[in-house]
Amino acid sequence: MRPRFKDPRLNAVKARELPLSGQALLDLMRDVLARGVPFRFRARGWSMAPFIKDGDVITVSPFQGRRPGLGEVVAFVRPGENKLVVHRIVRQDETNLYIQGDNSPGYVDEVIQGENLIGRVRRIERNGRRIWLGLGPERLVIAWLSHGKRLVPLQARLVSFLRRFT
């Protein structure tokens, strides 16, 4: 006798967001990335604006044995706080990565060790549309500007200039 299977369409559930934060989000992300699968979640906060804004959906992929490079946006655990953070690598040496938010001019670069890294941001979506700016080759200029505390003042001047035309 053959087993009878129900029509899979009858068992389908519409995908919804799972409201997780803090340790639960961090644990789930680590488990998913450990299986080699990208992880999508909704970003909270403004420390990476204008490239990643509060409410954007970001996709984090595992490193797969390749060390992240200058300008890449990475997810990491902030040492001492066990808190998930997504920021850009603004400087690196042989052992350390110096990470800072694009919209965090007052903060000193964080020094992050390899064991605190979780994954690299591969995709940003805002209002259902893919955002490219900040993840391509321009990431090197953004890292340089951010590390030199020039990004936020430049952004403010650019916004002020553009407002004259609106």
Image: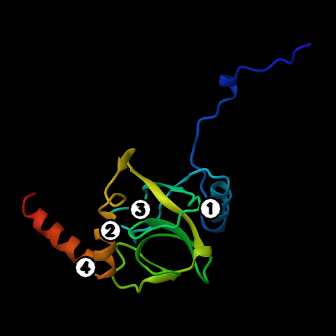
Could you tell me residue 25's position as x and y percent? 62, 62
Residue 91, horizontal then vertical, whole percent: 40, 78
Nearest to viewer (mark 3 / mark 2): 2
Residue 97, horizontal then vertical, whole percent: 48, 78
Give the numbered dot on residue 150: 4
| Between marks 4 and 1 in the image, the one whose residue lies nearer the viewer | 4
Find the distance from the CA under tag 4 to the CA under tag 2: 13 Å
Q: Nearer the viewer, residue 139 or 100?
A: 139
Q: Amino acid at mark 1?
A: Leu
Element type where label 1 sits in the image: helix
Name the spot of residue 112 as percent of width and height, x first: 53, 79
Q: Gap in Å between the C-alphas at discs 3 and 2?
A: 23 Å
Tag 2 residue? 140
Q: Secondary structure at mark 3?
A: loop
Residue type beneath disc 3? Asp
Crowding around mark 4 (Cα neighbors within 10 Å: few <14, some 14 to 19, many 20+) is some
Q: Please report contact status of discs 4 and 1: CB closer than 8 Å, yes or no.
A: no
- Left/right placement of residue 12 relative to residue 93 reads right
Say if 60 sits above or below 129 in the image.
Answer: below
Question: Mark 4–mark 2 contact, CB under 8 Å?
Answer: no
Q: Which mark is residue 25?
A: 1
**The image quarter in which residue 146 lies:** bottom left
- Nearer-N-terminus badge (3/2): 3
Name which of mark 4 and mark 3 comes first in the sequence.
3
Real-space CA distance between mark 1 and mark 2, rounded to the nearest whole angstrom: 29 Å
Q: Residues within 10 Å of mark 1 (few under 14, many from 20)?
A: some
On the picture, is 2 further left or further right than 84? right
Instruction: Work out whether mark 1 precedes mark 2 in sequence or the reverse, and give the earlier one.
Output: 1
Please tell me whether mark 4 or mark 2 is closer to you in this view: 2
